[in-house]
Amino acid sequence: MSVSEGKMEFAADIQSIWDLKEDVFGNKVSHVFVKSKLFMIYQIDDADVNNSLRVYISEHEDSKGIDKRYSYIRHFYFNAKGLLASSPNLNAMKYRIAKTVEDCLKDEELSKESAEQTFKNLINFIEEEYAKATKNRFYYLLPHFVAVPALFLVCLILMENRAPDNEWWIIFTSFLAASLGGFMSVLKNASKLNFYEYSQKRKYVFLGGERLLLSFVAAAIAFIVLKSGAILSLASFKSYWQVMLILVVAGFSETLVPSILQKMEARVSGKKEDS
């Protein structure tokens, strides 16, 4: 947050918004990005991201120059706000927009041309960041994009020889089930991940491959547990599809197999299990 310090006296309406945490329109102020003598840039509680970022210019007589400069950037400012909903790095983009508005309003020599160029650069930056995040998300999902169709094709080839005692059929259908569960998991969690952390694309491919490997390992352990009859017996299942469902769940969940292993560890070591 940018706040002017020192002995500067803020305009009465600016100070009132700061003290009451409520703007002149009755909106609750949830965060202040910039507090200056004659203007504020803040955020209100609003479900609409584009409407939450606000600029308020004081009614003080000295704010005429700021009003004029704001008229230069108003159109571009609203265009930049319109991109916030699609931005995967929302908070950082809000700060960047607020800082750009602050710089323009403080620049007494600001012209329409320079204001337009400043916001064009900002909008291009936001669009480039969104494109970068989209590409990184694709690379994160790439191992599953490759593994699921490949395993499905292999299972189709082995379809004529499918049988409960056909080891290759069992192995590849188990891997397919695990990869389907893992794919659902990464799709579900992709929107929550930070795709700005690494600049190299291969790191996201590695992370996606690591999650796929985790699905395979979890499904393999779950299959061994089922075959052993330690917790559930395969005889209790009426079809192999029910076994595959367990493997899908094992590939999807990152906690199912560890919890089973903890129970088995307690049973083998004779320790009392936690409730």
Image: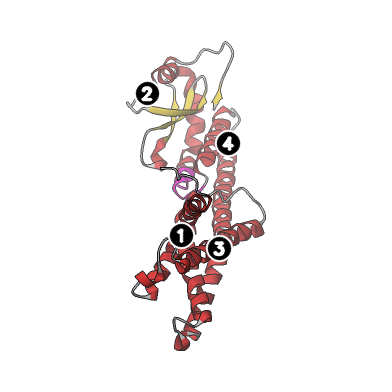
Residue 217 is tagged as 3
Q: Specify whether 23 is left or right of 7.
A: left
Seen at 49% across and 54% down, the residue is 264
Could you tell me the amino acid type at mark 3? Val
Could you tell me the amino acid type at mark 2? Glu
| Secondary structure that dominates the magenta span | helix
Picture coordinates of residue 200 (x, y %)? 67, 55
What is the secondary structure assignment of the residue under circle 2?
loop
Could you tell me the amino acid type at mark 4? Ser
> Which badge, 3 or 2, comes first in the chain's sequence?
2
Vertical placement of residue 215 versus 65, above or below: below
> Which badge, 4 or 2, comes first in the chain's sequence?
2
Quote the CA–CA distance across marks 4 and 1.
56 Å
> Which residues make up the magenta segment?
79-88
Q: Nearer the viewer, mark 3 or mark 2?
A: 3
Could you tell me the amino acid type at mark 1? Phe
Residue 22 is tagged as 2
Residue 111 is tagged as 4
Quote the CA–CA distance across marks 3 and 2.
54 Å
Vertical placement of residue 169 versus 193, above or below: below
* Residue in front for this viewpoint, 9 or 146: 146
